[in-house]
Amino acid sequence: MQVDQLRKTIEEAFDSVEVPRFEDLLAPRFRNSIDPLELAAAFREKQWRDLPAREVFRHRESLSTLSPVGYRSYIAPYLLGSLEGEDAADLVEYALFSLRPATDAQADADEVMDRLAAFDTAQREAIRGWLEYQIPHHPLASTILQRWT
């Protein structure tokens, strides 16, 4: 898939995602952590299209701290930002990291599966397309894609 088509697929898949309530933004275990709370404050009551690229980049390390509803609401700017631009390499790494368990612990695997379960079919296909696009440069994308299927 070409970059322009992938961008369009991602935008369309996440176009109607609603803004989550502030209290639903973060996964419960991160609701008292400083960096995730900064992300929540920056993203509060904003639709993903309204997030400045600098804010997305600034909070890249907290992407995996989002709850399933928060992740569904805010993964799109990370996927899009990773396609091109000066921040793309970092955004790819953090987006990939957020799509796999942080450790071998079952709790981490469950957390990722909960995040992924929040996507509808179009969103899953958009992420699948993004992972396939990343495979030539990021072998982890292939590993993640294999776990999905």
Image: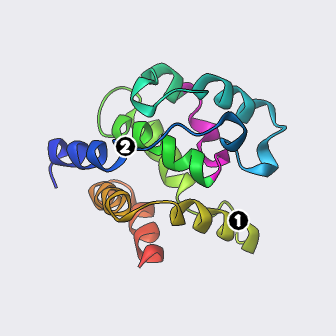
Between residues 134 and 20, which one lies in front from this camera angle?
20
Q: Is residue 66 magenta?
A: yes
Q: Is residue 38 found left or right of 42 in the rendered image?
A: right
Measuring from the top left, give residue 120's x and y in whole percent. 41, 62
Q: Tag on residue 108?
A: 1
Measuring from the top left, give residue 107's x and y in whole percent. 75, 69
Q: Tag on residue 12?
A: none
Q: Secondary structure at mark 2?
A: loop
Q: Dot 1 surroundings within 10 Å: few (below 14), some, or many (20 or more)?
A: some
**Can you tell which quarter of the image residue 53 is in?**
top left
Q: Is residue 133 found left or right of 111 in the rendered image?
A: left
Outermost residue, bottom side: 149
Q: Is residue 141 magenta?
A: no
Regarding residue 54, the answer to whether it shows in the image is yes
Give the residue at mark 2.
Answer: 16
Taking the spot 56% from the left edge, 35% from the top edge, the residue there is: 60
Q: Looking at the picture, which amino acid does disc 1 mark?
A: Asp
Q: Which residues are magenta?
A: 58-67
